[in-house]
Amino acid sequence: MARAAVPGATELLPPPTSGRRFVADRVVRLGDVDPAGSLRLDATARYLQDVATDDATDAALDGRFGWLVRRTLIDVARPALLGESLSLTTWCTGAGPSWAERRTAIAGAAGAAVDAVSVWVQVDGTTGRPTRLTGQFTDIYGEACAGRSVSARLSLGGPPGGAARRRWLVRRTDLDQFNHVNNAANWAFLEESVDSFGDRRGVAEMEFVAPVEPDADVGIRIDAASSACSAWLVCDDAVLSAARWTSR
Protein backbone atom coordinates (compact mmCIF):
# COMPACT_ATOMS: atom_id res chain seq x y z
CA MET A 1 0.00 0.00 0.00
CA ALA A 2 1.36 3.42 -0.96
CA ARG A 3 2.16 5.76 1.90
CA ALA A 4 0.05 8.89 2.33
CA ALA A 5 1.87 12.03 1.24
CA VAL A 6 3.11 14.29 4.03
CA PRO A 7 3.48 18.08 3.64
CA GLY A 8 6.74 18.81 1.85
CA ALA A 9 9.58 20.93 3.27
CA THR A 10 8.23 20.99 6.82
CA GLU A 11 10.44 18.36 8.52
CA LEU A 12 14.21 18.21 8.94
CA LEU A 13 14.90 14.50 8.58
CA PRO A 14 18.31 12.95 9.40
CA PRO A 15 20.58 11.59 6.66
CA PRO A 16 19.57 8.20 5.26
CA THR A 17 21.32 5.07 6.45
CA SER A 18 21.72 4.06 2.80
CA GLY A 19 21.35 5.74 -0.55
CA ARG A 20 22.92 8.71 -2.26
CA ARG A 21 24.45 11.62 -0.36
CA PHE A 22 26.47 14.41 -1.93
CA VAL A 23 28.99 16.67 -0.17
CA ALA A 24 30.44 20.00 -1.31
CA ASP A 25 32.57 22.69 0.31
CA ARG A 26 32.01 26.43 0.39
CA VAL A 27 33.63 29.50 1.96
CA VAL A 28 31.47 32.41 3.14
CA ARG A 29 32.47 35.42 1.05
CA LEU A 30 32.03 39.18 1.44
CA GLY A 31 29.02 39.33 -0.88
CA ASP A 32 27.18 36.71 1.21
CA VAL A 33 27.01 38.47 4.57
CA ASP A 34 25.15 41.25 6.38
CA PRO A 35 26.89 44.22 8.10
CA ALA A 36 27.50 42.02 11.16
CA GLY A 37 29.34 39.45 9.04
CA SER A 38 26.63 36.76 9.25
CA LEU A 39 25.42 34.75 6.26
CA ARG A 40 22.21 36.19 4.80
CA LEU A 41 19.16 34.12 3.86
CA ASP A 42 19.41 34.90 0.14
CA ALA A 43 23.04 33.76 0.14
CA THR A 44 22.07 30.60 2.04
CA ALA A 45 19.40 29.89 -0.59
CA ARG A 46 22.02 30.32 -3.31
CA TYR A 47 24.26 27.78 -1.56
CA LEU A 48 21.32 25.35 -1.45
CA GLN A 49 20.64 25.91 -5.14
CA ASP A 50 24.29 25.42 -6.08
CA VAL A 51 24.83 22.19 -4.11
CA ALA A 52 21.59 20.78 -5.56
CA THR A 53 22.81 21.58 -9.07
CA ASP A 54 26.25 20.12 -8.36
CA ASP A 55 24.64 16.93 -7.03
CA ALA A 56 22.46 16.56 -10.13
CA THR A 57 25.46 17.17 -12.39
CA ASP A 58 27.60 14.65 -10.50
CA ALA A 59 24.80 12.07 -10.76
CA ALA A 60 24.42 12.77 -14.52
CA LEU A 61 20.72 13.51 -14.03
CA ASP A 62 18.85 14.08 -17.30
CA GLY A 63 19.77 17.60 -18.45
CA ARG A 64 16.54 18.12 -20.42
CA PHE A 65 14.78 19.10 -17.22
CA GLY A 66 15.07 22.07 -14.91
CA TRP A 67 14.04 22.41 -11.28
CA LEU A 68 12.00 25.20 -9.65
CA VAL A 69 11.64 25.62 -5.90
CA ARG A 70 8.12 25.41 -4.48
CA ARG A 71 8.86 25.76 -0.75
CA THR A 72 11.97 26.05 1.45
CA LEU A 73 12.52 25.95 5.20
CA ILE A 74 15.86 27.12 6.65
CA ASP A 75 16.67 26.49 10.32
CA VAL A 76 19.62 28.53 11.59
CA ALA A 77 20.88 27.08 14.88
CA ARG A 78 24.16 29.00 14.57
CA PRO A 79 24.82 31.36 11.65
CA ALA A 80 27.82 31.03 9.36
CA LEU A 81 30.30 33.91 9.46
CA LEU A 82 32.45 35.74 6.95
CA GLY A 83 35.44 33.61 5.94
CA GLU A 84 34.10 30.42 7.53
CA SER A 85 34.69 27.17 5.66
CA LEU A 86 31.48 25.18 5.24
CA SER A 87 30.63 21.59 4.40
CA LEU A 88 27.27 21.09 2.68
CA THR A 89 25.71 17.62 2.65
CA THR A 90 22.56 17.06 0.59
CA TRP A 91 20.23 14.10 0.03
CA CYS A 92 16.71 13.33 -1.16
CA THR A 93 14.03 12.68 1.48
CA GLY A 94 10.86 12.16 -0.54
CA ALA A 95 9.11 12.58 -3.87
CA GLY A 96 5.78 13.18 -5.59
CA PRO A 97 4.64 12.80 -9.20
CA SER A 98 6.58 15.83 -10.49
CA TRP A 99 8.59 17.00 -7.50
CA ALA A 100 11.14 15.90 -4.92
CA GLU A 101 12.15 16.96 -1.43
CA ARG A 102 15.83 17.73 -0.80
CA ARG A 103 17.51 18.09 2.60
CA THR A 104 20.74 19.98 3.07
CA ALA A 105 22.86 20.23 6.21
CA ILE A 106 25.47 22.99 6.49
CA ALA A 107 28.26 22.61 9.06
CA GLY A 108 30.97 25.22 9.56
CA ALA A 109 34.57 25.00 10.75
CA ALA A 110 33.78 27.73 13.31
CA GLY A 111 30.57 26.05 14.47
CA ALA A 112 27.96 27.17 11.95
CA ALA A 113 24.92 24.88 11.95
CA VAL A 114 22.19 25.44 9.35
CA ASP A 115 19.62 22.89 8.21
CA ALA A 116 17.32 23.28 5.23
CA VAL A 117 14.71 21.38 3.26
CA SER A 118 13.10 22.29 -0.07
CA VAL A 119 10.50 20.95 -2.45
CA TRP A 120 11.77 21.20 -6.03
CA VAL A 121 9.42 20.77 -9.01
CA GLN A 122 10.87 19.16 -12.14
CA VAL A 123 10.02 21.20 -15.26
CA ASP A 124 10.60 20.92 -18.98
CA GLY A 125 13.73 22.92 -19.78
CA THR A 126 12.07 24.58 -22.79
CA THR A 127 8.49 25.22 -21.70
CA GLY A 128 8.96 25.47 -17.93
CA ARG A 129 5.96 23.19 -17.37
CA PRO A 130 6.03 20.46 -14.68
CA THR A 131 6.98 16.98 -15.89
CA ARG A 132 6.77 13.58 -14.20
CA LEU A 133 9.86 12.23 -12.48
CA THR A 134 11.69 9.68 -14.57
CA GLY A 135 12.89 6.18 -13.85
CA GLN A 136 16.42 7.56 -13.90
CA PHE A 137 15.56 9.85 -10.98
CA THR A 138 14.21 6.89 -9.01
CA ASP A 139 17.32 4.84 -9.80
CA ILE A 140 19.56 7.61 -8.43
CA TYR A 141 17.58 8.89 -5.45
CA GLY A 142 14.96 6.24 -4.70
CA GLU A 143 16.98 4.36 -2.08
CA ALA A 144 17.54 7.52 -0.02
CA CYS A 145 13.84 8.45 -0.32
CA ALA A 146 12.85 5.03 1.06
CA GLY A 147 9.36 5.29 -0.40
CA ARG A 148 8.47 8.50 1.44
CA SER A 149 5.83 10.52 -0.42
CA VAL A 150 5.57 14.30 -0.05
CA SER A 151 3.05 16.84 -1.30
CA ALA A 152 3.81 20.19 -2.93
CA ARG A 153 0.99 21.87 -1.02
CA LEU A 154 1.66 25.33 0.41
CA SER A 155 0.86 26.26 4.00
CA LEU A 156 1.56 29.96 4.56
CA GLY A 157 -1.58 32.08 4.39
CA GLY A 158 -2.15 35.44 2.75
CA PRO A 159 -1.58 38.90 4.25
CA PRO A 160 -4.06 40.35 6.76
CA GLY A 161 -5.90 43.52 5.87
CA GLY A 162 -3.75 45.70 8.10
CA ALA A 163 -0.36 44.51 6.83
CA ALA A 164 2.07 47.34 6.09
CA ARG A 165 2.95 48.05 2.46
CA ARG A 166 6.28 48.76 0.78
CA ARG A 167 7.31 49.08 -2.83
CA TRP A 168 9.68 46.50 -4.34
CA LEU A 169 11.79 46.67 -7.48
CA VAL A 170 12.52 43.68 -9.72
CA ARG A 171 16.05 44.01 -11.11
CA ARG A 172 17.46 42.42 -14.24
CA THR A 173 20.14 40.79 -12.12
CA ASP A 174 17.39 38.92 -10.23
CA LEU A 175 16.20 37.03 -13.34
CA ASP A 176 17.14 33.48 -14.31
CA GLN A 177 16.97 31.41 -17.50
CA PHE A 178 13.19 31.16 -17.23
CA ASN A 179 12.97 34.99 -17.27
CA HIS A 180 11.56 35.29 -13.79
CA VAL A 181 13.11 36.09 -10.41
CA ASN A 182 15.43 33.31 -9.27
CA ASN A 183 14.46 31.54 -6.05
CA ALA A 184 17.63 32.63 -4.23
CA ALA A 185 17.27 36.28 -5.30
CA ASN A 186 13.65 36.20 -4.14
CA TRP A 187 14.78 35.81 -0.51
CA ALA A 188 15.98 39.42 -0.60
CA PHE A 189 12.46 40.69 0.05
CA LEU A 190 12.36 38.84 3.39
CA GLU A 191 15.75 40.30 4.28
CA GLU A 192 14.27 43.76 3.64
CA SER A 193 11.09 43.05 5.60
CA VAL A 194 12.59 42.01 8.94
CA ASP A 195 13.54 45.02 11.08
CA SER A 196 16.15 43.06 13.03
CA PHE A 197 17.40 39.50 12.70
CA GLY A 198 19.14 39.75 16.09
CA ASP A 199 21.80 37.03 16.18
CA ARG A 200 20.17 35.37 13.11
CA ARG A 201 19.17 32.25 15.02
CA GLY A 202 15.72 31.19 13.92
CA VAL A 203 13.58 29.56 11.25
CA ALA A 204 12.85 31.04 7.82
CA GLU A 205 10.21 29.79 5.39
CA MET A 206 9.59 30.79 1.77
CA GLU A 207 6.80 29.64 -0.55
CA PHE A 208 6.76 30.38 -4.26
CA VAL A 209 3.14 30.79 -5.33
CA ALA A 210 3.60 32.28 -8.81
CA PRO A 211 6.55 33.49 -10.91
CA VAL A 212 7.78 37.05 -10.38
CA GLU A 213 8.05 38.42 -13.91
CA PRO A 214 10.31 41.23 -15.18
CA ASP A 215 8.68 44.68 -15.16
CA ALA A 216 5.99 43.44 -12.76
CA ASP A 217 4.55 46.13 -10.49
CA VAL A 218 5.21 44.37 -7.21
CA GLY A 219 5.12 45.36 -3.57
CA ILE A 220 5.69 43.87 -0.13
CA ARG A 221 3.06 43.39 2.57
CA ILE A 222 4.48 42.97 6.08
CA ASP A 223 2.97 41.72 9.34
CA ALA A 224 5.57 41.89 12.12
CA ALA A 225 5.40 40.71 15.72
CA SER A 226 8.00 40.66 18.50
CA SER A 227 9.57 37.33 17.53
CA ALA A 228 8.16 36.73 14.05
CA CYS A 229 7.74 38.54 10.76
CA SER A 230 5.53 37.43 7.88
CA ALA A 231 5.96 39.02 4.46
CA TRP A 232 4.34 38.64 1.07
CA LEU A 233 5.44 39.69 -2.39
CA VAL A 234 2.29 40.81 -4.20
CA CYS A 235 1.20 42.11 -7.60
CA ASP A 236 -2.24 43.76 -7.76
CA ASP A 237 -2.99 42.08 -4.39
CA ALA A 238 -2.25 38.62 -5.83
CA VAL A 239 0.35 36.81 -3.70
CA LEU A 240 3.46 35.78 -5.66
CA SER A 241 5.57 34.64 -2.69
CA ALA A 242 4.94 34.19 1.02
CA ALA A 243 7.65 34.16 3.69
CA ARG A 244 8.05 34.02 7.45
CA TRP A 245 10.94 34.53 9.87
CA THR A 246 10.66 33.33 13.46
CA SER A 247 13.50 34.23 15.85
CA ARG A 248 14.71 31.89 18.55
Image (spheres, rainbow, N blue to C red):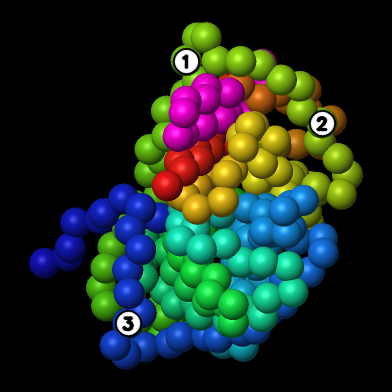
Q: Which residue is mark 2?
A: 169
Secondary structure type for disc 2? loop
Kind of residue at badge 1: Pro
**Marks 2 & 3, CB-CB < 8 Å contact:** no
At 50% across and 9% down in the image, what residue appears? 161
In front of the other: 37 or 47: 37
At 82% across and 64% down in the image, what residue appears? 30
At 35% across and 53% down in the image, what residue appears? 10
In front of the other: 104 or 172: 104
Helix, strand or loop: magenta stretch: strand
Q: Is residue 96 left or right of residue 6?
A: right
Residue stretch rendered in magenta on the structure: 222-236
Kind of residue at badge 2: Leu
Q: Judge the density around disc 1: few (<14), some (14-19), many (≥20) Cα neighbours within 10 Å.
A: few
Q: Which residue is mark 3?
A: 16
Q: Which residue is mark 1?
A: 160
Please provide percent x and percent y for residue 170: 81, 36
Kind of residue at badge 3: Pro
- Which of pointers 1 and 2 lies earlier in the amino acid sequence? 1
Please provide percent x and percent y for residue 52: 59, 72
